[in-house]
Amino acid sequence: MNKYSDIFGKQITITVDRPLGSAHPDYPEHYYPVNYGFVEEIVGGDGDEQDVYLLGVETPVASYQAVVIAVIHRLNDVEDKWVAAPPDMPFSIEDIRRSTYFQERFYQSEIFLKS
């Protein structure tokens, strides 16, 4: 059991502020290959709302209900990133690392997956 066990499988509503295919607001050459957003009223390590990568949804969305399947724990940053997906859609650590590489390549991290 790891320290994230209490959130694995938790159903959340993600507000997607950076839909799949959209450009990063500060770096317009940087496009999001997955939907990316946050969970309202849950505060992350940076003091803002908890960030979430949404995997398994291949179209841009504004909001989505999914379950937390993993946590990317950044070793050289103050916040963790949650990874969510539609229920019963499995992803391996390698799948998650590949899907989030566009942003996570700038950080040292470890991925915790529901065991």
Image (cartoon, rainbow, N blue to C red):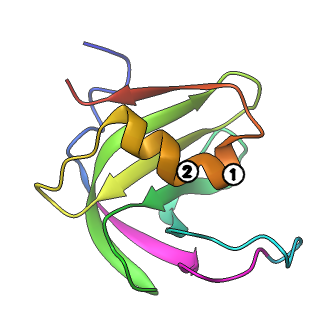
Q: Please check the rendered image and state whether residue 34 is part of the magenta-colored stretch, yes or no.
A: no
Badge 2 local density, few (<14 within 10 Å), some, or many (20+)? Answer: many
Q: Point out which mark residue 100 bears.
A: 2
Q: Quadrant of the N terminus?
A: top left
Q: Is residue 43 visible?
A: no
Foreground residue, 62 or 46? 62
Span shown in magenta: 12-24
Is 69 on the left-hand or right-hand side of 115? right
* Three-letter amino acid code at the position of disc 2: Thr
Q: How many marks?
A: 2
Q: Where is residue 78 drawn, in percent x and y?
A: 73, 32
Q: Which mark is residue 26?
A: none
Quarter of the figure with residue 80: top right
**Quick one: quadrant of the C terminus?**
top left
Q: Nearer the viewer, residue 105 or 7?
A: 105
**In the figure, 97 relative to 108: above or below?**
below
- Return the mark for residue 103: 1
The residue shown at (60%, 45%) is: 44
Rendering coords of residue 34 (x, y %): 50, 68
Task: Locate residue 108, reporting x and y percent.
Answer: 70, 25
Disc 1 secondary structure class: helix
Residues under numbered marks 2 and 1 in contact, where contact means CB atoms less than 8 Å apart:
yes
Secondary-structure class at tag 2: helix
- The vertical placement of 10 against 111, above or below, is below
The stretch drawn in magenta includes residue 16 = yes
Where does residue 54 sit, x and y in percent of width and height?
41, 63
Q: Residue furthest right?
A: 26
Q: Residue at x 49, y 56 (%)?
A: 52
Instruction: Name the quadrant containing residue 84.
Output: bottom left
